[in-house]
Image (cartoon, rainbow, N blue to C red):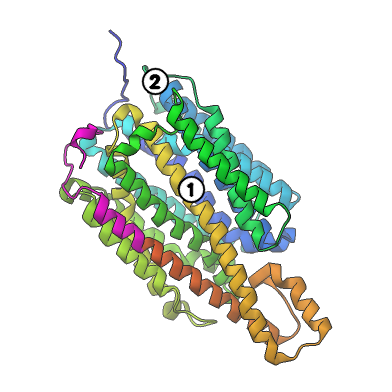
C-alpha cells in the first residue's frame, strides 16, 4: 500500500542548502530594497506614500498567497512549487531592475511577492519533510542562521551597488542566486507531498484575504495624504476580512484551517510572530531613512550599520534552535522578546548626528541578541505544533502572519510618523516667521519627510528634528509590541521541553 506521506531522505543536506539559498532570495531582497529606498525615492521622484507601496505591494501579494503557496506544496509537490516560486521571483526581479516609473516598480514588486509566496513556505516545508522532529529544530536553526548570514551581505553589497552603480542593480543580485537554487533543486532534491490532502484550493479565500489586506493597507497609507476613498477602502477591507474568516470556517478545504488554532502552542506562537515582526518590519523600513537622510550615511554605510544585528542572529541561531528541546519555547521567547523591546527603546536615544558607535551600535547589538534568541525557537514551535503532513500550510500561515504584521506596521508607523512630523514641523516653523512663499515651499516638500530640501538651513534643521521626533515615537511603539510578545509567550506557551516529540502533538496533549 502506498504511504500517505512521502518523506525525503532523512537529513538530506542538499534539501537544506536549497532551502537556505531559496529563502535567501526573499530575505536579501527585503533588506536590500530597504537600503535602496532613499535612492529610489530620488531616482523616480516618489513620495513617502508611493515608497510605502514599493514595500507594501510586495508584502501584500506575498502575505495573501503564502497560504496558497504552502497548500500547493503539500498537495502537488513541494519541490515543484518551490521551483515555480524561484523562477517567478527571478522574473519579477528582472522587471524591477528595468522599471521606468514608480508605478512600474510597484507592479514588478507585486510579481516578486507572488513568486516569494510559493518560494518561502516551500523552503521550510522541504526541511520539515526531510528532517524528523528530533533534529528539525537544529535544521531550522541552521536555516535561520545561514539565511541571516546571506541577508547580512545583502545590505552591504546592495548599499555599495546603490552608491557606485544604481538602485536598479540591487534587483539583479537575485538572478544568479536563483539560477543556483534551480540547479540544486533539479539535481539533488527529491519530491514530497501529502497524498491524502484535498487538492481543491481555496481561491475565494485568497481573493477575500487580498481584498481585505489591500483595502486596509490603502486606507492606512493614504490617510496621511487625505486621498479620496480612504474610508470606503478601509470599510471594504474590514468586511472582506470578516468574510474571509466566515469562508474559512465553512470551506471544505480552507486556505487557513482554523482548527490549527485550537492548539494553544500554534495560536500563541503566531500571536508572538505578529507582535514581534510588526515591530521589526516597521523599524527596518524606517531606520535606513533615518541613517541616510537624517544622519547622512552613505547607502553602503547604512547597510553596514545593520550588519551586527544579522551576524548575531547567524552566529547564535543554530544554538537557539536547540533551546526548545532543552527548555521549551516559553522561556527563550519571553526573554528574547524583552531584550528586543530594550533594543527598540535604545533606538530612541540618538538625536541628529553623532558617530555610529555612540548612537546606533548598542541598540543594534541588543536587538540582534534578542532576535537571535527568538527566531529559531519561534519557527520551531510553529512547525512542531502541527503534524508533518500539514507542515506546508503551517509554514504558510506563520509566514503570512509575519508578512501581514510587517505590512500593517509600515502603514501604521508611516501614518504615525507623518502626522507627528507635520505637527512637530509646524511647531518648529512658528518662531522662524517665514513668508507665505517660503511656507508654501515647505508645504510642497512635506510628503518627502526626511528627503525634503529647502534653501533655508533653519527649515532643514527643523525638518530633521521633526523626523527624529516621529521616529522616536514609532520605535517606542515597536518596543511596546515586543513586550506584548513577551507577555504572550509567558501566558500561552508550554514551558515543558518538547525534546524528541513528533512533528505535532494531538490537541489533547497540548496545554
Q: Position of residue 393 (x, y in %)?
A: 40, 33
On screen, residue 173 versus residue 122, left or right, reads right
Outermost residue toward the right? Answer: 437
Measured along the vertical axis of the image, is residue 222 above or below residue 460?
above
Judging by the rendered image, the residue that carries numbered circle 2 is 197
Of 32 and 327, the residue lying toward us: 327
When asked about the image quadrant of residue 394, the answer is: top left
Measured along the vertical axis of the image, is residue 438 above or below residue 219?
below
Q: Residues within 10 Å of mark 1 (few under 14, many from 20)?
A: many
Say what secondary structure mark 2 lies in. loop
Q: Which mark is residue 294?
A: none
On screen, residue 351 versus residue 456, left or right, reads left
The residue sitting at 54% across, 77% down in the picture is 469
Q: Is residue 378 magenta?
A: no
Of 325 and 219, the residue lying toward us: 219
Where does the magenta region start and end? 483-511
Can you say which quadrant of the picture contains the N terminus?
Answer: top left
Judging by the rendered image, the residue that carries numbered circle 1 is 403
Can you say which quadrant of the picture contains the C terminus?
Answer: top left
Q: CA distance from mark 1 to mark 2?
A: 26 Å
Say what secondary structure mark 1 lies in. helix
Amino acid at each position: 500500500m502506498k504511504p500517505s506521506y512521502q518523506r525525503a531522505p532523512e537529513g538530506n543536506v542538499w534539501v537544506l542548502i536549497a532551502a537556505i539559498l531559496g529563502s535567501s532570495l526573499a530575505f536579501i531582497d527585503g533588506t536590500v530594497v530597504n537600503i535602496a529606498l532613499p535612492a529610489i525615492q530620488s531616482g523616480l521622484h516618489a513620495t513617502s506614500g508611493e515608497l510605502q507601496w514599493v514595500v507594501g505591494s510586495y508584502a501584500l501579494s506575498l502575505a495573501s498567497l503564502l497560504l496558497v503557496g504552502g497548500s500547493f506544496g503539500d498537495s502537488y509537490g513541494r519541490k515543484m512549487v518551490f521551483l515555480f516560486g524561484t523562477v517567478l521571483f527571478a522574473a519579477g526581479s528582472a522587471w524591477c531592475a528595468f522599471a521606468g516609473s514608480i508605478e512600474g516598480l510597484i507592479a514588478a514588486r507585486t510579481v516578486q511577492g507572488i513568486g516569494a509566496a510559493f518560494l518561502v513556505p516551500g523552503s521550510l516545508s522541504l526541511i520539515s519533510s526531510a528532517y524528523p522532529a528530533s533534529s528539525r529544530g537544529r535544521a531550522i536553526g541552521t536555516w535561520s542562521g545561514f539565511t541571516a548570514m546571506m541577508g547580512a551581505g545583502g545590505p552591504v553589497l546592495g548599499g555599495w551597488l546603490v552608491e557606485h552603480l544604481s538602485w536598479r542593480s540591487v534587483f539583479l543580485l537575485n538572478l544568479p542566486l536563483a539560477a543556483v537554487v534551480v540547479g540544486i533543486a533539479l539535481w539533488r532534491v527529491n519530491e514530497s507531498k501529502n497524498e491524502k490532502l484535498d487538492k481543491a484550493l481555496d481561491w475565494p479565500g485568497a481573493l477575500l484575504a487580498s481584498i481585505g489586506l489591500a483595502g486596509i493597507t490603502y486606507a492606512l497609507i493614504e490617510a496621511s495624504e487625505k486621498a479620496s476613498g480612504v474610508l470606503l477602502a478601509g470599510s471594504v477591507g474590514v468586511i472582506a476580512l470578516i468574510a474571509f474568516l466566515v469562508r474559512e470556517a465553512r470551506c471544505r478545504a480552507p486556505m487557513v484551517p482554523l482548527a490549527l488554532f485550537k492548539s494553544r502552542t500554534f495560536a500563541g506562537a503566531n500571536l508572538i510572530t505578529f507582535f514581534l515582526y510588526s515591530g521589526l518590519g516597521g523599524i527596518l523600513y524606517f531606520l535606513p531613512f533615518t541613517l541616510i537622510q537624517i544622519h547622512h550615511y552613505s547607502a553602503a554605510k547604512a547597510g553596514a550599520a545593520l550588519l551586527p544585528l544579522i551576524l548575531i542572529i547567524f552566529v547564535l541561531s543554530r544554538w537557539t534552535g536547540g533551546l526548545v528541546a532543552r527548555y521549551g519555547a516559553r522561556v527563550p521567547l519571553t526573554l528574547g522578546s524583552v531584550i528586543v523591546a530594550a533594543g527598540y527603546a535604545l533606538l530612541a536615544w540618538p538625536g541628529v548626528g553623532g558617530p555610529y558607535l555612540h548612537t546606533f551600535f548598542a541598540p543594534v547589538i541588543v536587538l540582534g541578541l534578542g532576535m537571535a534568541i527568538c527566531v529559531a525557537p519561534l519557527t520551531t514551535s510553529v512547525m512542531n505544533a502541527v503534524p508533518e503532513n500539514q507542515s506546508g500550510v503551517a509554514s504558510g500561515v506563520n509566514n503570512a502572519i509575519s508578512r501581514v504584521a510587517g505590512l500593517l506596521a509600515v502603514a501604521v508607523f508611516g501614518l504615525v510618523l507623518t502626522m507627528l512630523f507635520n505637527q512637530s514641523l509646524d511647531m518648529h516653523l512658528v518662531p522662524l516667521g517665514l513668508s507665505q512663499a517660503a511656507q508654501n515651499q515647505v508645504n510642497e516638500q512635506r510628503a518627502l519627510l526626511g528627503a525634503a530640501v529647502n534653501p533655508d538651513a533653519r527649515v532643514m534643521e527643523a525638518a530633521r528634528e521633526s523626523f527624529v521626533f516621529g521616529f522616536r515615537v514609532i520605535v517606542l511603539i515597536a518596543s511596546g509590541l515586543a513586550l506584548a510578545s513577551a507577555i504572550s509567550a509567558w501566558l500561552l506557551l508550554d514551558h515543558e521541553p518538547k525534546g524528541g516529540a513528533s512533528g505535532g502533538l494531538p490537541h489533547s496533549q497540548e496545554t
